[in-house]
Structures are given as structure tokens and as C-alpha cells.
Amino acid sequence: MRYVPKQPREGINVSDTHPLVEAGTLVVGPTAIFVLIVLALVFLIELALYFVPAEKEAELFRDWLPDDLVTVSPGDERLYETQLLVDRLAFHWADSPYEFRVEIDDSEVANAMALPGGLIIVTQGLLDQVESENELAFVLGHELGHYKNRDHIRALGRGIVFSLVFAVATGSGDAAGLGLKVSDLALRGFSRKQESRADEFALAMVYTQYGHVNEAWRLFERWDDEDHSILDLVTYLSTHPQAGDRVESLESLAVSESWPLQGRVTALQW
Ligand SMILES: [Zn+2]
């Protein structure tokens, strides 16, 4: 048999569907599937939060500390004073299921975090930058606000939330098995909405504690003015709103609630 070469017919690589329709299917299809998956995961996290009530969470993490946390000495008076301030603030949140514990991370980078079970971590770098108790109270109140709204659990990520559900469901209450690390959690931010709700909670708390909101956001005003060499030391800003925006919205919240902008500032106790 002899092989007779011949050209393939015209248009063999062109589909019969209009290219725009085809492009549409290729974009819309996967996007719709992606959106559905995201919605399902969001729903599952809400469901998981329902199955792990704050009381269970507090119990499971009662004495837990992340493995990679390097704390300052337990005798450090800033630790004692910060814990005292958290306790005084938390007193205004009467039905809190948490017993808040403060630890000071031995890091020069300014940050503050809400970890499961009521463990609030502030860094040495943050304490170096606050200049009054009122400033510190706002930062701590903001973290308390994340507990109030349970943002800290949502921020853990799906994998850990499900391990948490599993641990609670099977009663194998071992928080250490979840493998949570400060280094992973430090950079997990919250949504804008979660941040502003935590800010509102914090400002109300500061007002209740001091009877005014003077200096509550003074730290952010300073950060807003600083040059960038100092801002490099502030990871707080990578997980929290921009300092300038924050000052504006806190100020207008205080004005709309008629919380006094002036009042006696309390000095830090160290
Ligand atoms: Zn926050």
C-alpha cells in the first residue's frame, strides 16, 4: 500500500462554538465552582464554631502555650502589670467565658495577638512603644474584642478549626496536638470589618474604664507620623488597619458616642 500524504481539512483546530461563548464557559465555570467551594468552607467554619463553644475552647487550652513562644522572665513587672490591666478591662465584659492569660513575647517587633483559650500575647517591642496605660488599654481591649467576636478561632484556618472540632468531639482534649505556632499565627490578619468591630469594642471598654478616651489611639497617631525605618519594626500594622485610617474612625466613633476626648492620662506602672 502506498502512503498518499494529504492536508488535513481546513479548520480542524477551530471549535464550532463561538470563541466568546467558549471563553465565557472557561471563565464562568471554574469561577462558579471556586465561589461555591469558598462558601461551603465559610459555612463549615461557622458550623465548627458552633460545635466548639468558647467554654470548651477555654477548657481545652487552659494551660497551653505555643512551643515556639519565647517569653520574658515570669518575674518581669511589665508582665504583672499587663495581666492586671487585662483583668481590669475584662471585668467590664461580665459574661466572658475566658480566663485571660498574658504572656510577653521576647521580640523587638511590635505586635499583639489573641490566641485560643484566652492567651493574649504582646511583644516586648510593643511595650517599648506604648507611652501610657491608656494606649496599652486600647491595644489590649482590641484583642479582647477579637475574643468577643471569636475572630481568633476563624483566623486559625480551616485545618486547625477542624482538628479543634475533632479534639472536642472525641474528648481527646490535647491542645498541644494541634501544633499551633506563634510564628504562623503572628501574620494572620483579620478582615476590615472584624478589625473595626474589635476597635469599637476596645474604645467602649476604654471609655468604661477611664471615663474618657484620651490617648486611646495616641500610639497609632505616632506610628502614622513616624518614618518607615521605625515602621519596619511594627508587624502590628501588617495584621491591623493602617494607623491613619484607624485614628480617623476612632475619633469619629468617640464623637458620635459623645465620649470625652479629654481626661486624665494614667501613667504606665513600670
Ligand atoms: Zn485586630
Image (cartoon, rainbow, N blue to C red):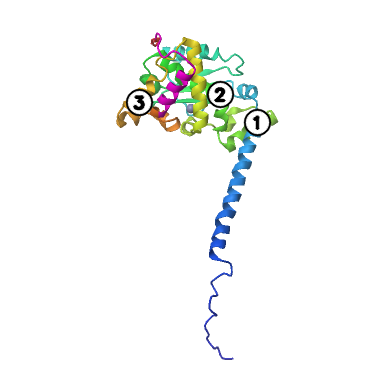
Q: Give the overall secondary structure of the magenta segment.
A: helix
Q: Which residue is mark 3?
A: 223
Q: Which mark is residue 167?
A: 1
Q: Residue at x 62, y 46 (%)?
A: 36
Element on which disc 2 rests? helix
Q: Quick check: 44 above or below 80?
A: below
Q: Are marks 3 and 1 in contact (CB under 8 Å)?
A: no
Identity of the amino acid at label 3?
Answer: Trp
Label 1 Cα crowd, 10 Å radius (few <14 / some 14-19 / many 20+): some
Q: Which residues are magenta?
A: 245-264
- Label 1 and label 2: CA atoms lie apart by 20 Å
Q: Quadrant of the N terminus?
A: bottom right
Q: Quadrant of the C terminus?
A: top left
- Label 3 and label 1: CA atoms lie apart by 41 Å
Element on which disc 3 rests? helix
Whether the magenta-drawn stretch holds residue 60 is answered as no
Whether the magenta-drawn stretch holds residue 261 is answered as yes
Identity of the amino acid at label 2?
Answer: Tyr
Whole-percent x, y for residue 136 in the image = 43, 17
Q: Which residue is mark 2?
A: 147
Whole-percent x, y for residue 70 in the image = 44, 25
Identity of the amino acid at label 1?
Answer: Ala
Mark 3 within 8 Å of ligand 1, using the beta carbon: no
Q: Residue at x 49, y 27 (%)?
A: 196
Query: In the image shown, does 110 or 148 lie closer to the viewer?
Result: 148
The extreme top residue here reads 264
Whole-percent x, y for residue 37 in the image = 61, 45
- Label 2 and label 3: CA atoms lie apart by 25 Å
Label 2 Cα crowd, 10 Å radius (few <14 / some 14-19 / many 20+): many
